[in-house]
Amino acid sequence: DDTNTLQIATTAYVVKAIANAMSKITGISFDGPYASYEEMLEQVTEPKTGIIYLVSNGGSAPNVNDEYFWKPTTQSFEKFGSTAVDLSKYVKIDDLKEITAAEVEAKWNAIFK
């Protein structure tokens, strides 16, 4: 909030901005999981800030819940995340091949000599 978009992002400015944002956080707790978003709306009659509401999304581990927080400015829930983790672009063990110390040394020498 109240960020000056023309402000240079010095370390001091960023540290102060983070400290200001964090000063409003008094704690975080979790509620749920609820079977659906609709169930959460029915059961949470007095939503509170600082609570992460978990809603089951029908996925499989580790992607089993979506996360919502209460936004008092709009008097509504906002989805801010999912436990979904896309690892498809990461290296898998099957993608790796064993190399020798001599191969490592040869690459090192090619780059740094």
Image (cartoon, rainbow, N blue to C red):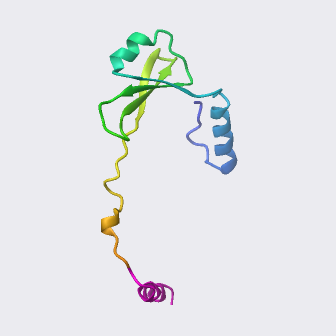
Instruction: Say if the magenta span includes residue 30.
Output: no
Image-based side of 13 in relation to 39, left or right: right
Per the image, is 107 magenta?
A: yes
Residue drawn 54% across and 17% down?
48
Q: Is residue 17 above or below residue 41?
A: below
**Horizontal and vertical percent position of residue 111:** 46, 84
In the displayed structure image, the side of residue 44 where residue 15 appears, left or right: right
Question: What secondary structure is the stretch in magenta mostly built from?
Answer: helix
Magenta residues span 99-113
Going 63% across and 28% down the picture, which residue do you hit?
A: 25
In this rendering, the answer to whether 66 lies above or below 85 is: above
Quarter holding residue 65: top left
Q: Quadrant of residue 91?
A: bottom left
Query: Horizontal placement of 20 versus 57: left or right?
Result: right
* x and y percentages locating residue 12 in the rendered image: 70, 47
Using the image, determine if residue 17 lies above or below residue 76.
below
If the image is split into quadrants, where does the N terminus sit? top right
Residue depicted at 47% across the width and 14% down the height: 75
Q: Is residue 93 above or below residue 63?
A: below
Q: Residue at x 37, y 77 (%)?
A: 98
Q: Where in the figure is residue 100, as x and y percent of width and height?
A: 41, 84
Residue 27 % position (x, y): 62, 28
**Viewer-side residue, 68 vs 35:** 35
